[in-house]
Image: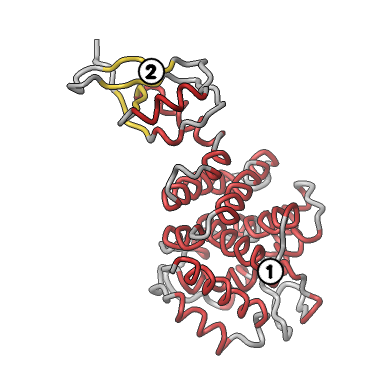
Amino acid sequence: MSQKRYKAIDKRLITEGSQLDFDLFLSNDTKTSMSLFLQSDTAVDGNAKVKLREIETLYISSEEEELYNAYVSRHLQSIAKSTDIPTEQKARLVYEKAAEAIDSMFKNPESLENVKNVQPVVNNFIEIILHDNSAVESLMKITAHDYYTHTHSINVSIYTLSLGSFLGISGKDLEVLGMAAILHDLGKSKIDYEVINKNGKLTDEEFNHMKGHPAFGHEIALKLGITDERILSGIRHHHEKVEGGGYPDNLKGDQISQFARIIGTCDVFDALSTKRSYKDPMSSFESLLLMKQQMKGHLDMSMVDAFIKMLRKQVEGKE
């Protein structure tokens, strides 16, 4: 019979008041054997949390790793609120779980269940951003990687929630803004994979195909029963331009909703500051400079200025 294997976990992720559906173990002094600390079906009470403070490392059976991961996902909002866990670790954990939910959504975007699973992702980001001054910087460190459609959607939602909060949007309105941002590229699920991931400039024909994604996303959202005009406009109009000439509806100025203008600004920033198959990423400074100098007829400059102030506030808050 094979020997049971164990995996060390972060004890801070075990939240008080939660119900375990896996066993927790401690190692003995010589680290050669394990003893049961809390059994499956046990509630984590205050006494258990006190004991946990004295324990160096906590373990689970490798066989129960899936149960543990599901537990972390269920309790992610409590983890996001925790003051015991370093911001960067919370940010990475929430980002990883968000990537799983968004990946599932893009694989089957017309599944209402998959879209519903995205709402907790938004709420977790809101928890971190609103309750931790260094959260945006920590999340930005994680976002500075290669560009993929699903990670781009997460990045844009992080920037959008941060900017929305800075602009005074709060409560349910902020949740709606976050949902609009995370769903903004839903229509890319209808674009050919080869076009989205092309290593180089798109042909005119390919670009025209790509320009269909806001309308495709809007159509999918309607099929899913999404009726909030703020979400629908964020999906459909994030590529409109303040002086006209954008797509799909050639809107201009105040015809473009506030949510779409916020998302449009954050969408461009992430596209410039992440690595693509055909270009290296720009720094945040280079990205914002280009946006200020070359995109006056495209982006709402009041949103760009607010974005810069929001990032500056993050830096000043850290000093």
The reply to whether residue 70 is visible in this rendering is no
* Circles 2 and 1 in contact, beta carbons < 8 Å: no
**SS at badge 2:** strand
Position of 43 with respect to 50 (left or right) is right
Tell me which residue sits at (55%, 56%) in the image: 154
Q: Quadrant of the C terminus?
A: bottom left
Q: Position of residue 216 (x, y in %)?
A: 70, 60
- Rounded to the nearest whole Å, what is the CA distance between mark 2 and mark 1? 47 Å
Question: Label 2: how many residues lie within 10 Å, few (<14), some (14-19) or many (20+)?
Answer: some
Residue 167's label in the rendered image is 1
Along the line of sight, the residue nearer the viewer: 42 or 236: 42
Tell me which residue sits at (46%, 79%) in the image: 285
Q: Position of residue 255 (x, y in %)?
A: 81, 76
Question: Label 1: how many residues lie within 10 Å, few (<14), some (14-19) or many (20+)?
Answer: some
Residue 37's label in the rendered image is 2
What's under tag 2, amino acid-wise?
Phe
Along the line of sight, the residue nearer the viewer: 79 or 190: 79
The extreme bottom residue here reads 293
What's under tag 1, amino acid-wise?
Leu
Above or below, comparing residue 24 to residue 272 in the picture: above
